[in-house]
Amino acid sequence: MCVINLKGGVGKSTITALLSRYAFNTRKKNVLAIDLDPQANLSQGLMHQSYTAFIKGNGGSIVEVFADYMPPAKGGGGAQPLSTDHVTQMILESGDRRLDLIPSRFDFSDALTNAIRPDPRILARFLAKNYKEKDLILIDCSPTESVFTTAAYHASDYVLIPVKPEFFATIGFPLLAESLSNFRRRNKAHSIEVAGVIINNAFYDGGNDGGPEKQRAMEAIAIECKKNDWYIFPRQMYHSRGYPKLMRGDYSHQGDAAYFPSLAKDLLDHLGV
């Protein structure tokens, strides 16, 4: 499932990270998270302090997945065939289950868009070849339409759309609907469905719940979702400063972030995972 909205700042990385941890810890699933965003927020959130060492060590990442090889390292040996060990970071492990991450790097966009246009099917082939044992694969997407958006579609059964109920809330909806329509038209054998829309609430539980501005935004969201036949999850995410802590596995003083597992349960139940 790719987590996407062609509008930034809606919580894609946060939702991907928290859903990954919930599926592993609570649902006991074997999980892979993939950071397909050059900002690398998912990678930083899940790896926390080890991300700095990863960058300094020139570790394998989503860049190498699209390049389809490991470049020569210091000490010689030349380029190497790509393996999962090159690009996978283990976040959590329990028995034969793992929460793994294919991280991103800040040079992701430059390394790939300045090169020959990457094959949009290469990520799907890599996952099909190496990660069929995973119960759930989540792809955190960039908010811009590109070949990497198409790559995420090729690798996915489902699309999850986070949105914030604020002014310009639905600005990315027509773009995303057109993007999915174009993909389906060009890939008629590929079944990809919208799992639903998550309202990433910009307000605290127990507050005024946004007042008339949120109400207007919610009405606009409902109209666009009805137009596209997109399901809206009834339970919303409340605004909380506890989300960054949960992303890195710190469950102390969660605040309103403590409500997220209920939403995650609804989502995975909806998918039958």
Image (tube, helix red, strand yellow):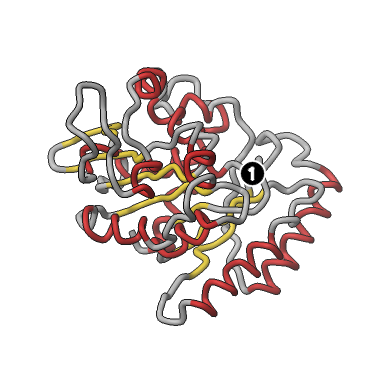
Which of the two residues, 117 or 131, is positioned nearer the viewer here? 117
Please give the residue where the numbered disc 1 appears in the rendered image. Answer: 10
Q: Look at label 1 and name its amino acid.
A: Val
Residue in the picture at 24% in, 39% down: 79
Residue in the picture at 70% in, 56% down: 172
Left or right of 273 on screen, residue 40: right
Q: Callout 1: few (<14), some (14-19), or many (20+) C-alpha neighbours within 10 Å?
A: many
Q: Percent x, y for residue 176? A: 63, 62
In the rendered view, would you say 19 is above or below 6? above
Classify residue 53 by image quadrant. Answer: top left
Classify residue 229 by image quadrant. Answer: bottom right
Q: Percent x, y for residue 155? A: 39, 61
Q: Which image quadrant: the N terminus?
A: bottom left
Which of the two residues, 147 or 229, is positioned nearer the viewer here? 147
Which of the two residues, 199 or 162, is positioned nearer the viewer here? 162
Q: How many marks?
A: 1
In the rendered view, would you say 210 is above or below 223? above
Q: Percent x, y for residue 54? A: 35, 23
Q: Which image quadrant: the C terminus?
A: bottom left
Quick one: which residue is furthest to the right in this view? 212
Residue in the picture at 47% in, 45% down: 36
Q: Percent x, y for residue 205? A: 65, 36
Quick one: which residue is furthest to the left in this view? 95
Q: Is mark 1 on a helix, strand or loop?
A: loop
